[in-house]
């Protein structure tokens, strides 16, 4: 979303100052162990807006911790690594890069697709989750009724699509510029931005998202996940999509 892009721009703008200050910081902390996840490029791991145990028992704290601090962090580190030799990645909007993967050199296309895709998907994922998530209402609920056959059918169809996704991937609700919603899956870390659409919301059906608690029972995870959705955030994203400002 646009705040994401703004963060990147701000980071890029303060990058020189950070570099200039770095030796002093390192010197002052010479006796301390190096920080584990210091930002090393234009992309940063967004902090969770809630504690890792916020979704117990639906998603266990350990899964949240590994998923955010290890899996998502790895996508960020990998794309930062590519950005070292391809600095244009860090200054462009994520939606523009993922929307034009074919413009990238073959040597980095695959890595960017998987890792910037992973960064975008997980950034959306943490954003649309939250405790006490409420219910869809207003324009969002009207769109769900109109395009997805109402809440019950929507949730059943979304769960079924997530269950059918073979191997790793995502189940999304995509939103078109006119506000029309659709349920779509993508393999791996692909994102609807790769074909010019936007993800309104989505659920991660990689095994790392649920295996500690649910093992092979993906269907149970898909069902329980609805307890974690922050509908106010989804509604914000819906309004942004209709205004043409929804990014990641
Ligand atoms: Mn994941």
Image: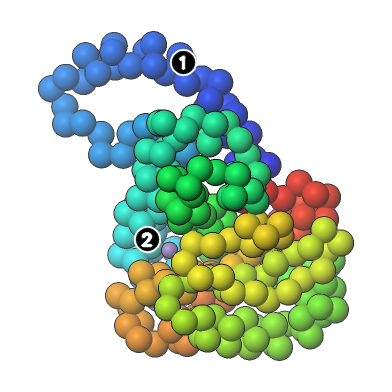
* Alpha carbon separation for disc pair 2 and 1: 31 Å
Residue 198 image offset from top left, x and y in percent: 69, 59
Q: Nearer the viewer, residue 48 or 193?
A: 193
Please say which color scheme the image uses: rainbow
Which residue in the structure is indicated by mark 2?
A: 67
Residue 13 vs residue 220: left or right?
right
Q: Which residue lies at the image location 64% right of the left edge and 62% below the top edge?
A: 192
Is residue 206 visible in the rendered structure shown here?
A: yes
Q: How many marks?
A: 2
Task: Find numbered disc 2 in the image and state the secondary structure of the residue it sits on.
Answer: helix
Residue 179 vs residue 205: left or right?
right
Asked whether the residues under the numbered discs 2 and 1 touch, taking CB atoms below 8 Å apart as contact, a structural biologist would say no
Q: Which residue lies at the image location 58% right of the left edge and 61% below the top edge?
A: 191
Q: Nearer the viewer, residue 170 or 23?
A: 170
> Which of the two discs, 2 and 1, labels the residue nearer the N terminus?
1
Residue 176 image offset from top left, x and y in percent: 79, 63
For ligand 1, tell me if the residue under mark 2 lies within 8 Å.
yes
Is residue 76 visible in the rendered structure shown here?
A: no
Q: Which residue lies at the image location 30% right of the left edge and 75% below the top edge?
A: 212
Which residue in the structure is indicated by mark 1?
A: 16
Local packing at callout 1 (Cα closer than 10 Å; few below 14, some 14-19, many 20+) is few
Ligand 1 positioned in quadrant: bottom left
Local packing at callout 2 (Cα closer than 10 Å; few below 14, some 14-19, many 20+) is some
């Amino acid at each position: 979303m646009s705040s994401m892009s703004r963060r990147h721009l701000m980071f890029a703008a303060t990058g020189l100052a950070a570099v200039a200050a770095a030796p002093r910081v390192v010197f002052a902390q010479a006796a301390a162990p190096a920080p584990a996840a210091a930002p090393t490029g234009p992309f940063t791991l967004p902090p969770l807006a809630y504690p890792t145990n916020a979704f117990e028992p639906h998603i266990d704290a350990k899964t949240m911790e590994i998923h955010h601090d290890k899996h998502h962090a790895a996508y960020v580190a990998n794309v930062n690594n590519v950005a070292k030799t391809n600095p244009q990645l860090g200054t462009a909007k994520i939606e523009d890069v993922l929307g034009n993967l074919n413009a990238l050199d073959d040597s980095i296309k695959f890595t960017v697709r998987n890792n910037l895709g992973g960064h975008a998907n997980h950034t959306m994922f943490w954003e649309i989750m939250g405790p006490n998530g409420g219910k869809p209402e207003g324009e969002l609920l009207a769109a769900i009724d109109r395009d997805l056959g109402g809440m019950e059918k929507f949730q059943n169809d979304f769960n079924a699509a997530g269950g059918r996704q073979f191997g790793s991937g995502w189940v999304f609700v995509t939103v078109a510029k006119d506000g029309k919603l659709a349920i779509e899956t993508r393999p791996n870390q692909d994102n609807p931005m790769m074909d010019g659409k936007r993800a309104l919301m989505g659920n991660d059906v990689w095994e790392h998202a649920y295996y500690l608690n649910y093992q092979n029972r993906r269907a149970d995870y898909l069902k329980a996940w609805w307890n974690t959705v922050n509908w106010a955030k989804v509604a914000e994203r819906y309004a942004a999509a209709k205004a043409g400002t929804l990014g990641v």
